[in-house]
Image: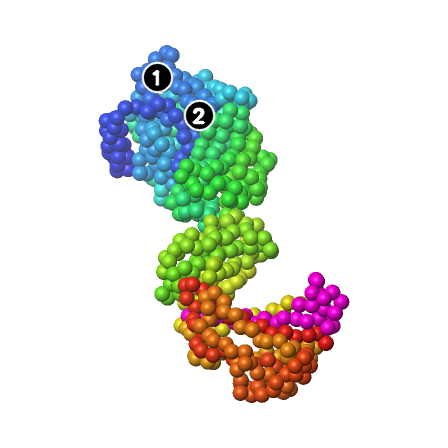
Amino acid sequence: MLAIARWIARLFAVFVMTWSGSALAAVCAPATSQGTAPASWQTYCWLDFTTYNDATARTGAGQNFSYTLSDGAVLTFTVRTTGAAIRSIAAPSWGGAAVGNTAFLGIPNRPILYQSAAGTTQVTISNILITPPPGAPAVTAYMFVGADAESTNDGESLSFNTNGGNWTLLDQVDPITGATYPPISGIGTQTFTETGVPGTVGGYIVGSTSPTTVQTTLVGGGLQGAMFAVRFASMRLTKVINGARVNAADQFRFDVTATSTGTTLATGVTSGSGTGPFTAAAVSLASGVPLTLSESMAAGSVSPLTSYSPSLTCTNGTVGSTTPLPTNVATTSFNFGALQFGDAIACTFTNTAFPHLRIQKALGGTGRRFASDQFTMSITQGVTSVASTTTTGTGTTVTSGATALLQVTAGQPYTFAEAASGSTVLSQYTATMSCTNARNGTTTAFAVPATITPILGDLITCTVTNTPRAANASLTTVKSSTVISDPVNGTTNPKLIPGAVLSYSINVSNSGSLGVDSSTVFILDPLPTTLEYNGASTVTFANGTPVSGLTFNAATDVRWSRSATAPANFAGCTDVPTAGFDPTIRYVCIRPTGTMAGATVAGQPSFVVSFQTRIR
């Protein structure tokens, strides 16, 4: 029953492939998936026999094959067939075969030479030659591989004879079920044989170093097959993105090239928003071609490669190889040199974004307090501004509100801050800052200003949101002094020395949007004991721009106090200074009258009062 099932399955497959289209050119390629194959599974380049012609192969000259291998080397040989007819088919040869179902999955094209009639078939592959690509050394060692491509059952057998190195067992391929294998003989000799047994069985893969002739004998009832590969070494290069991309459009290309010629042997490109590993750029080598691994930004990327910190790490699936392997090497191009026979190298370029920072503005509530209010957003490192922008727009619209995403140095502190632009008053707003890090997706709240020390991979965008405070009046006072004269220099470049006469000025402004209650502005200025009030001078009042809206009369709106404690109000100021400099005056009391206006788009209403003192 097993043989009948195999015959029906193979008959259907042959019918489909016979009418599936034109023949493919002769190529060789590795399997696309490992299955239970050994770690070196990608060092096997399986030979495609799609163009096999049984009639041609049975002539005296046989059929010539030429394969341009993935590393640029050229494999040539002649196939001559005698005995029962054969044809080429795809792998796996049927659902019960070991190779193609449990290991070495996805071998492309038609790599199997399969009996199409019962009996004994002898396939001789002769004149095997590998010619290296230009610039590569002569191929002095390679391995020619033979594999059981079917299920060697009861009454069947498969043998390989070589004039090269004795056969080495490369893999015992698991059966699709159970643990039965056909008996074998000849490992370590030039003739290897499998002898069939009943049931669903596993298979074997063997290799001979540098033969020029391999002869294969298939014995079966029309259900026996063999497949072949050339093996030297393999390189797989993939990409991992550690964290987030600097720009969502950024993609990477990674290449395996022949060092001497620059020919690209394999290439891969990242895609989407994932971090990898991405589909590897894989090449099976048949010659000692020195390799260079490199990466670059793919078309459509926004950021340059210098926006990312690179790292290259390689491992070798072949134990005992002395091929040097890079580990965490910071490079975007690495000259690997020639691989050793049997190397199964897997390399990964890992890219981590250098720290990038950005600050941007948002408006909450009803937007701006005044239509002309604008804000300057900045990032500084120490005293140096590294990024800044000043907003434009009106109402809730913010234009030019974000700096570019700036590449910075890991481990250095950076301060995020804002400042008022033009007539804007920050005290009319509450400010909050929320920072999002694309590296890990976290969002953190900070006070404004805030200092952040980024690490490698950080992509931080901080948003400062300003929300107008509830309408109020908010008075600010600024006191300043000017030296008028001194006893030594007079009025020419006077100095702050004993006896110097000073003019004190008190600037009062309303940054709130509401006016002050009528006649409630009261200035109480304490004088230190080192100063004497000039009773002979007059307290002056000057409006700022915009004007305050207050009125002032020096005769009625100024009083003084000699009290040791501060008067509670204007009425508590009851003293009058002497006509000259009076050292006993401790407080100057000033009360303009009227309603001080609130801030408008024109600015903050203000006024200045001034009086004189002398240094004791």
Residue 338 is one of the magenta-drawn residues: no
In the picture, measured across the screen, residue 364 lies left or right of residue 314, that is left
- The residue shown at (48%, 37%) is 296
Q: Residue 330 carries which label?
A: none
The single residue placed furthest to the top in the displayed view is 60
- Asked if residue 126 can be seen in this view, the reply is yes
| Kind of residue indicated by mark 2 | Leu
- Asked if residue 473 can be seen in this view, the reply is no
- Relative image position of residue 600 (x, y in whole percent): 41, 66
- The residue shown at (39%, 28%) is 227
Question: Is 174 in front, or is 596?
Answer: 596
- Quarter of the figure with the N terminus: top left
Residue 507 is one of the magenta-drawn residues: yes
- Relative image position of residue 436 (x, y in whole percent): 45, 58
Q: Residue 69 carries which label?
A: 2
Dot 2 falls on a residue whose secondary structure is: loop
* Real-space Cα separation, disc 1 to disc 2, in angstroms: 22 Å
Question: Is 85 in front, or is 106?
Answer: 106
Dot 1 falls on a residue whose secondary structure is: helix
| Kind of residue indicated by mark 1 | Ala
Choose the circle earlier in sequence order: 1 or 2: 1
Q: Magenta region: which residues?
A: 484-513
Question: Mark 1 and 2 residues: CB-CB less than 8 Å, in contact?
Answer: no
Mark 1, mark 2: which one is toward the viewer?
A: 2
Give the residue pinned by disc 1.
Answer: 57
State whether the magenta stretch is mostly helix, strand or loop.
loop
Near mark 1 (Cα within 10 A), the count class, few <14, some 14-19 or many ≥20, is: many
- The residue shown at (53%, 45%) is 309
